Amino acid sequence: MVGTGQDSSSENHELDLHQALQELEQYQADLNYHQAQASLHQLLERLDLAPQEAAELAETLDSLEEMLTKLQEGVVHIAVFGLVGRGKSSLLNALLGQDCFATGPIHGVTQTSSRAVWAGSAGLASGSSRVVLPGLGQSRVELIDTPGLDEVGGEARQVLAQGVAQQADLILFVISGDMTKLEHQALWELRQASKPILLVFNKVDQYPEADRQAIYAKIRDERVRDILTPNEIVMVAAAPLVPKLVHHPDGRITAELTPGPPQIEDLKLKILQVLQEEGKALVALNTLLFADGVNTQITARKMVIRDSQANQLIWKSATAKALAIALNPITMVDIVSSLVIDLTMIQALAKLYGLEMTREGATQLLQKIALTMGGISASELLANLGLSSLKGILGLAAPATGGASLVPYVSVAMTQAGIAGFSSYTIGQVSKEYLANGASWGVAGPKTVVRDILASLDQSEILGRLKLELQQRLRPSRA
């Protein structure tokens, strides 16, 4: 009797420990779920997009909003994938218990992704009429059908399928026999998305038992040994055909194949088990993975947009500086106007990249760039001092020479303007690199940044563009 009491006490202790561990796991899952919501909220709030950027990234932003809504409503996405004719739509219809997804004898019936809420008779909570996540009574599971991955001319549909895969929390990859090379490759690519996958061997009713087991063993031991575990492979018959005796009026009796009840209980239990044990964690993890990928895309696209806008700003500043130099015959006016244009350009670039910069800060940055550029800055100063003086003399001599001195005046002005414009363009490109890097020269330092940018610039091409721009701007004033 004493021994029995000790055994009972030990069992109770183990039950209490097991329950405590379950509660701890549930608490951690809830915590991760709420942290995922908070992280997504913060991401959306901190994107810092200009109106033009927000307009160009509208579709991507919508996907983030959808993911946030998905978290708030507790939505789980289960997506089905596979080649044409493997019975994907039939499988989903069998899970749903009704024909919500199009099926037919012609390959490629599913042309776009479609979805339906799984409201089957088996729920995760006692008495539930819907499949829900534990702790989220208002949650729902959506089943998503996708086009066949091998459809001819279906590149756009394949991109669509890949997009759905990114947002899916659980993937059902459907085959209907021994795997092809294309199926193996597609399964491997889907596995790289770090999503849970169930390999569904469908249409097993079409094989004799011995053949069915042989195919299953080959898939398990050879085809997917390095991709999936045996526990992730399920055999089903979503739309089995069973023989039925038909009595004819003439007395004949024949057998015809007619649709039978789906054989998918193992798959349904496997899905429910995954949702019960890992559902909230899967949704939270998948949301964070998706958000991280989208954030990377947004950041990259935002930098491309800002780079384009920065280049336009730099070119306008370079041409404005070149034009100011060309039109001003007084040396000090040339130097002052050049300085103002460069400082204004740097401040405008800082604003474009979301950075605060005072005129003093812009001056310090310009000084740093000028010192680092060395030769170009010195040549611009000499050009401003020397060519401006010559330009002034030629301009004053115009009345005495009957306007003959204006020909060399224009030539000197264009040369001076080209040097100044190229210098401003270079300063702009260096400033852009510094500001795009968060007001930092990075590990390489300013000298390396300047050297690399100078090496990448085509001086003759830029000077040619500036000359053409000046000719177009000045032509009306000479008319």
Image: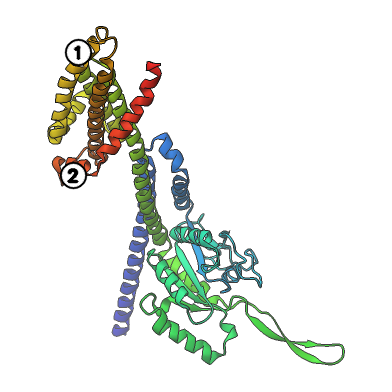
The residue at 30%/77% (across/down) is: 10
Helix, strand or loop under label 1:
helix
Q: Amino acid at mark 1?
A: Ile
Of residues 153 and 86, which is closer to you in this image?
153
Which mark is on residue 393? 1
In the rendered image, which quarter contains the C terminus? top left
- Residue lying at the far top in this picture: please name it: 400
Mark 1 to mark 2 CA distance (whole Å)? 46 Å
Q: Please state the horizontal and vertical placement of residue 185, each as a whole percent of the image.
A: 42, 72
Of labels 1 and 2, earlier in sequence is: 1
The residue at 14%/25% (across/down) is: 382
Which mark is on residue 442? 2
55 with respect to 98 (left or right)? left
The residue at 29%/80% (across/down) is: 6
Q: Is residue 283 visible?
A: yes
Q: How is the image coloured?
A: rainbow
Of residues 47 and 339, which is closer to you in this image?
339
189 with respect to 241 (left or right)? left
The residue at 38%/75% (across/down) is: 227
Q: Quadrant of residue 469?
A: top left
Q: Please state the horizontal and vertical placement of residue 141, each as a whole percent of the image.
A: 52, 60
- Residue lying at the far right in this picture: please name it: 250
Helix, strand or loop under label 2:
loop
